[in-house]
Image (cartoon, rainbow, N blue to C red):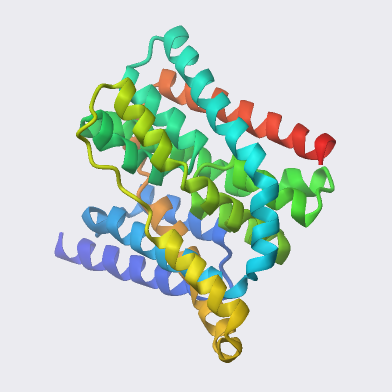
């Protein structure tokens, strides 16, 4: 038993080190994580969620050192209309799907918020507001993470198939992929401009956690709940400002950006390593179906809008 544990830890550490090299892309890192979760197991599973959250925040702030404020503002303004329409149409559709599929009200609302705003971060912020229990939160997170994993491979392939420009793809990623990690991973694979547009629009979208959480507190009649504000978005803005207006930053910015991309790759490995088949099995078909239908709606509607309205 001790030897098995040592081998498990050894393999896990070796794979993390491999993910820090240029040989492993973000999608491959996610795939390696899924394999290790279901073959040898995650030796540090109790720390996985915390480590993933911290690494993702570090990576997002680091990516700010590769972006220009003026370009970011242009992308943010363009994505603003799409953000408002997509968020509220997804939440409304999620409500009707929960009625149609007879899904637990709290699970359904968490899936809808995760799809509409920013995946796991939105679920983590909304869960205490509606006072969901551990199982309800886990089911919603499981649905979102499964679809995120698919998106990381599917979106770049569809983008190339439809000959989307870097700008179009970045905007589509930010609107239609749930979690920031998968948005950045898919956009990074597509190109530098796609990465800048996707990251900026996605983080602006994440700020909608606050008004949606306030609305949720009223709907669920729980006005005393504390709402978690994603402070790392502020640090991302500071990083962009430094990169744009402080000339001295230019010498170290490429190194920070490189470390951020490594952090993202390791984050996706850890996300995959947390998705054991038992977790997936416990989700149930109805919540997964709601997640797929909502995702299909937002991905298709946003893609059509970007192609024909921009």
Between 55 and 47, which is closer to the camera in this rendering? 55
Residue 55 visible in the current orientation:
yes
Tally the numbered discs.
0
Note whether 84 is above or below 30 in the view shown: above
x, y (%) of residue 108?
A: 39, 22
Residue shown at the point (47%, 7%) measured from the top left: 100
- Please indicate whether residue 263 sits to the left or right of residue 87 in the image: left
- Please indicate whether residue 33 sits to the left or right of residue 63 in the image: left
Note whether 159 is above or below 217 in the view shown: below
x, y (%) of residue 114?
A: 44, 36
Q: Locate the C terminus and report the quarter of the image it occupies.
A: top right
Residue shown at the point (70%, 64%) measured from the top left: 71
x, y (%) of residue 53?
A: 35, 57
Residue 282 visible in the current orientation:
no
x, y (%) of residue 242?
A: 54, 79
Q: Locate the N terminus and report the quarter of the image it occupies.
A: bottom left
Quarter of the image holding residue 4?
bottom left
- Please indicate whether residue 109 sits to the left or right of residue 200 in the image: left
Going by the picture, which residue comes out furthest to the left?
2
Between 108 and 248, which is closer to the camera in this rendering? 248
Residue shown at the point (37%, 47%) measured from the top left: 38
- Please indicate whether residue 90 sits to the left or right of residue 278 in the image: right
Residue shown at the point (41%, 68%) measured from the top left: 58
Between 219 and 138, which is closer to the camera in this rendering? 219
């Amino acid at each position: 038993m001790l030897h098995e544990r040592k081998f498990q830890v050894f393999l896990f550490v070796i794979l993390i080190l491999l993910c820090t090299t240029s040989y492993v892309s973000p999608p491959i890192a996610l795939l390696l994580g899924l394999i290790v979760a279901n073959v040898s197991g995650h030796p540090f599973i109790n720390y996985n969620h915390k480590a993933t959250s911290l690494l993702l925040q570090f990576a997002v702030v680091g990516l700010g050192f590769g972006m220009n404020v003026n370009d970011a503002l242009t992308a943010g303004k363009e994505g603003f209309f799409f953000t408002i329409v997509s968020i509220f149409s997804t939440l409304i559709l999620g409500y009707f799907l929960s009625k149609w599929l007879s899904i637990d009200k709290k699970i359904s609302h968490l899936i809808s918020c995760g799809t509409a705003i920013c995946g796991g971060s939105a679920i983590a912020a909304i869960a205490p507001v509606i006072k969901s229990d551990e199982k309800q939160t886990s089911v919603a997170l499981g649905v979102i993470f499964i679809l995120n994993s698919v998106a990381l491979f599917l979106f770049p392939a569809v983008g190339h198939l439809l000959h989307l420009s870097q700008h179009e793809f970045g905007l589509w990623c930010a609107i239609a992929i749930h979690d920031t990690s998968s948005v950045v991973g898919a956009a990074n694979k597509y190109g530098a401009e796609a990465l800048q547009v996707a990251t900026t629009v996605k983080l602006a979208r994440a700020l909608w956690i606050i008004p949606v959480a306030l609305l949720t507190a009223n709907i669920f009649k729980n006005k005393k709940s504390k709402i978690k504000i994603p402070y790392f978005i502020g640090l991302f803005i500071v990083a962009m400002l430094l990169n744009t207006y402080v000339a001295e930053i230019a010498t170290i910015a490429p190194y920070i950006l490189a470390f951020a991309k490594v952090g993202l790759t390791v984050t996706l490995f850890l996300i995959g390593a947390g998705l054991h088949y038992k977790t997936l099995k416990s989700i149930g078909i109805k919540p997964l179906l709601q997640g797929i239908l909502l995702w299909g709606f937002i991905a298709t509607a946003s893609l059509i809008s970007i192609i024909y309205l921009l």
